[in-house]
Image (cartoon, rainbow, N blue to C red):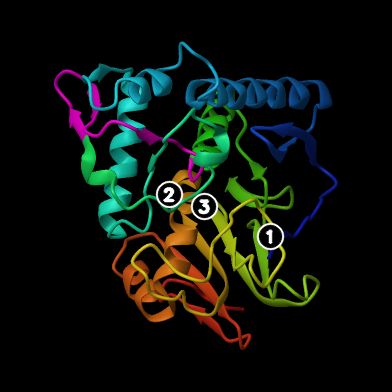
Amino acid sequence: MLALKKVLANNSTIYRREVRLMGNKFEISVVGNDPVWAGEKINSAITEINRVEKLLSTFSEDSEINAINRNAGIKPVKVSAEIFKLIDRSIQISELTYGAFDITYYSAGKDSDTDNHTAIASYTVVNYKDVQLDATATTVFLKEKGMRIGFGANSKGYAADRAKYVLQLEGVSHGVINAGGDLLTWGLQPDMEPWTVAAADPRQQTQPFADMDISNMAVATSVNVEKYATINDKKLNTVKSKNGFTVSEIKSVSILSPTAEFADAMATPVMTIGVNAGLYLINQLNQIGCVIIDDHNRLYPSKSINIT
């Protein structure tokens, strides 16, 4: 569980707005002195998040994602550079996690967003290795008929990254985007102190285990929902992973990363592979950290995390 620690100062204020976007509760906060200015900037962030939602939607018949899915097993589809790069990054994360993260799935019938809201492909016949990318032609080809791709596992983080980018372009030097419980921060609090969060036991949300400095970082959390209440729409079947092994008894995993997209994508896979393998994986990566809490309330930070 992550709780943003809010600190105010007399010379500036945190202006925030809560809105329902992409099926999640987003809270956009900017630091400034002018409420009109702050409102305009928050509007720009909301516009960008709505753009990303439309870009990645499977409901729109003319969307690039639908075009890719409709032509599965038939022909490559030329896509925008933005979509191509997002798919390419997703495939890299799949390779990094040995398929624990996978944007592909199999659909015997009509597409639905419900199919997309998972970080782990539920149909083992197709996987990320069946996605063929041509960087020169910027085309995407799904090799198997019935194969689909969806971004339910990392779209929220990507939207937050894009909103932050727009806000920074428009002169917002300090802020926080809370995307359904996942946090993305930049700059500092009004008193020039870092943004921090408290990592807590999911069953005891008011009892923090540790404070973490997350300024200019993103943090995403995945919770074992078979035993504990969800806090940010990430859901995991804890009985078996797709390779048939039981999932280790982890309560929650929090990933710290420079981008919300990567943090969002990595949280559930680390839970899937267990404490030791998860820590080993994270410790091999630059600028990435994690905090794992097991079912005995034991805290396992990666080597890059300083606990206070």
SS at badge 1: loop
Q: What amino acid type is highlighted by mark number 3?
A: Met
Q: CA distance from mark 1 to mark 3?
A: 22 Å
Q: Position of residue 18 (x, y in %)?
A: 79, 36
Q: Is residue 111 left or right of residue 134?
A: right
Q: Quadrant of the N terminus?
A: bottom right
Q: What amino acid type is highlighted by mark number 2?
A: Phe
> What stretch of residues is rendered in magenta?
132-154
Q: Is residue 15 left or right of residue 230?
A: right
Q: Is residue 133 magenta?
A: yes
SS at badge 2: helix
Q: Quadrant of the C terminus?
A: bottom right
Which of labels 3 and 2 is toward the front?
2
Q: Residue at x 52, y 52 (%)?
A: 217
Q: Position of residue 219 (x, y in %)?
A: 55, 56
Q: CA distance from mark 3 to mark 2?
A: 11 Å
In the picture of the structure, the residue carrying the numbered disc 2 is 262
How crowded pointer 2 is (Cα within 10 Å; few <14, some 14-19, many 20+) is rated as: many
Q: CA distance from mark 1 to mark 2?
A: 20 Å
Q: Position of residue 59 (x, y in %)?
A: 55, 21
Q: Residue at x 48, y 43 (%)?
A: 154
Which of labels 1 and 2 is toward the front?
1
Q: What amino acid type is highlighted by mark number 1?
A: Thr
**Disc nearer the start of the sequence (3/2):** 3
Front residue of 237 and 21: 237
Q: Residue at x 40, y 76 (%)?
A: 303
**Disc nearer the start of the sequence (1/3):** 3
In the picture of the structure, the residue carrying the numbered disc 3 is 217
Q: Is residue 36 above or below residue 188?
A: above
Front residue of 146 and 166: 146
In the picture of the structure, the residue carrying the numbered disc 1 is 230
Q: Give the number of the disc on residue 289.
A: none
